């Protein structure tokens, strides 16, 4: 009995240490994958003299005649050859030339969207496990900056642009590549955690802003989104959550819509992700992870840093139109970021030199 008791005590002491070691390994793998993504972005830039676009990348434009949904393909699609996925990219191109691969939500056949890519998935995120035939997710989202924008909009406060209208290269990042984020972790949503802050999407409806069908920046205050987080980590009363299917946060690596492959630096790390009407309507995705205290972010110079969730995020009670010179078009604002150091790291040319 004494021996059994000792063994039980030892197991109790060892299990937390084993779990901590495993999480440390997962965190290291996640960091390495972000570094590889950064290297891929740099190689892409070397060849194309620009960063990949968040939507409508110029490389894919040649397929617009065959494919009405080509603009919807995410920044990860043209990057496939740079992450040792040339065979998958060639399969994608073959389908695109034939007029297939219409929309990245299409899982009716064996399109590339149902192919799991480990390099796009953080091992700490349980939402990455999806069944055969389901569209596969991503943990890594490209930086859209500090003002909420639709995936097809002209403006570009972050480094993720609409390729139809703007190209972003390193010379456009006047705040410095070491002071500007390229990508971050964002927790993947799943039916089992859809009501959780990390991974879920809170549907705020009328509380989203004064112009619910137009621009969320007009009247939208980040504090309204942060308020849906309860003390137990779940959404509080008054906020509904995104449903099941292929519509959850980050669930489509090939889709450029805001709730799939984009994130904003409007709210600090590990804040809720909020949308208006449905998960795809003006989704303001926040950087998030399942590790304690913060998130890993990839800078434009290729370095990866851990950002604490307590990083300065400025005055979260103000809306972008309160800061902008043209109150009707806050997306045109070119000054300093309104939401502190974290927000400044999201803007490529706000005139700030804040670093972590």
Image (cartoon, rainbow, N blue to C red):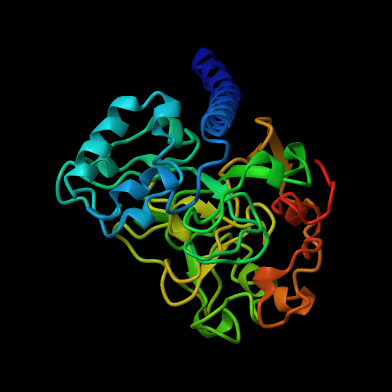
Identity of the residue drawn at 46% across and 45% down:
75
Instruction: Measuring from the top left, give residue 8's x and y in whole percent.
Output: 52, 22
Instruction: Measuring from the top left, give residue 213's x and y in whole percent.
Output: 48, 83
Decide if residue 293 is in sight here.
no
Above or below, comparing residue 28 to residue 79 in the picture: above
Horizontal side of 216 relative to 280 (left or right) equals right
Say which quarter of the image contains residue 329: bottom right
Identity of the residue drawn at 80% across and 41% down:
356
Above or below, comparing residue 251 to residue 318 in the picture: above
Which of the two residues, 304 or 328, is positioned nearer the viewer here? 328
Instruction: Measuring from the top left, give residue 9's x and y in whole percent.
Output: 58, 22
Which of the two residues, 18 or 288, is positioned nearer the viewer here? 288
Above or below, comparing residue 129 to residue 196 in the picture: above
Which of the two residues, 225 or 160, is positioned nearer the viewer here? 160
Decide if residue 248 is in sight here.
yes
Horizontal side of 334 relative to 44 (left or right) equals right
Identity of the residue drawn at 67% across and 44% down:
181
Which of the two residues, 230 or 113, is positioned nearer the viewer here? 113
Say which quarter of the image contains residue 242: bottom left
Instruction: Measuring from the top left, give residue 55's x and y in whole percent.
Output: 45, 53
Q: How many numbered circles are shown? A: 0
Identity of the residue drawn at 49% across and 35% down:
122
């Amino acid at each position: 009995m004494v021996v059994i008791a000792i063994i039980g005590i030892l197991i109790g002491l060892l299990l937390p240490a084993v779990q901590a070691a495993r999480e440390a390994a997962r965190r290291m793998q996640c960091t390495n994958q972000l570094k590889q993504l950064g290297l891929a972005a740099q190689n892409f830039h070397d060849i194309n003299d620009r960063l990949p676009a968040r939507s409508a990348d110029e490389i894919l434009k040649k397929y617009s005649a065959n494919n009405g949904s080509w603009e919807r393909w995410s920044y990860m699609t043209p990057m496939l050859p740079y992450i040792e996925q040339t065979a998958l990219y060639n399969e994608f191109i073959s389908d695109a030339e034939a007029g297939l691969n219409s929309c990245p939500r299409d899982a009716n056949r064996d399109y590339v969207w149902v192919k799991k890519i480990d390099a796009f998935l953080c091992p700490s995120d349980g939402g990455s496990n999806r069944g055969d035939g389901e569209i596969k997710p991503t943990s890594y989202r490209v930086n859209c900056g500090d003002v909420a924008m639709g995936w097809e909009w002209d403006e570009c406060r972050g480094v993720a642009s609409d390729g139809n209208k703007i190209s972003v290269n390193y010379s456009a990042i006047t705040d410095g590549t070491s002071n500007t984020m390229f990508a971050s972790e964002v927790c993947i949503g799943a039916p089992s955690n859809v009501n959780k802050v990390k991974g879920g999407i809170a549907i705020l409806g009328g509380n989203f802003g004064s112009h619910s069908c137009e621009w969320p920046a007009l009247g939208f205050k980040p504090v309204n989104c942060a308020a849906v987080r309860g003390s137990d980590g779940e959404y509080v009363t008054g906020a509904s959550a995104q449903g099941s299917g292929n519509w959850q946060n980050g669930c489509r690596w090939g889709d450029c819509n805001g709730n799939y492959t984009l994130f904003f630096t409007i709210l600090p790390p590990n804040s809720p992700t909020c949308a208006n009407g449905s998960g795809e309507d003006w989704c303001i995705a926040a950087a998030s992870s399942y590790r304690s205290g913060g998130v890993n972010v990839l800078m434009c110079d290729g370095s990866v840093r851990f950002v604490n969730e307590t990083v300065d995020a400025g005055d979260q009670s103000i809306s972008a139109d309160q800061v902008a010179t043209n109150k009707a078009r806050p997306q045109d604002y070119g000054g300093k970021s309104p939401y502190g150091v974290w927000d400044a790291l999201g803007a490529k040319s706000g005139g700030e030199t804040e670093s972590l």
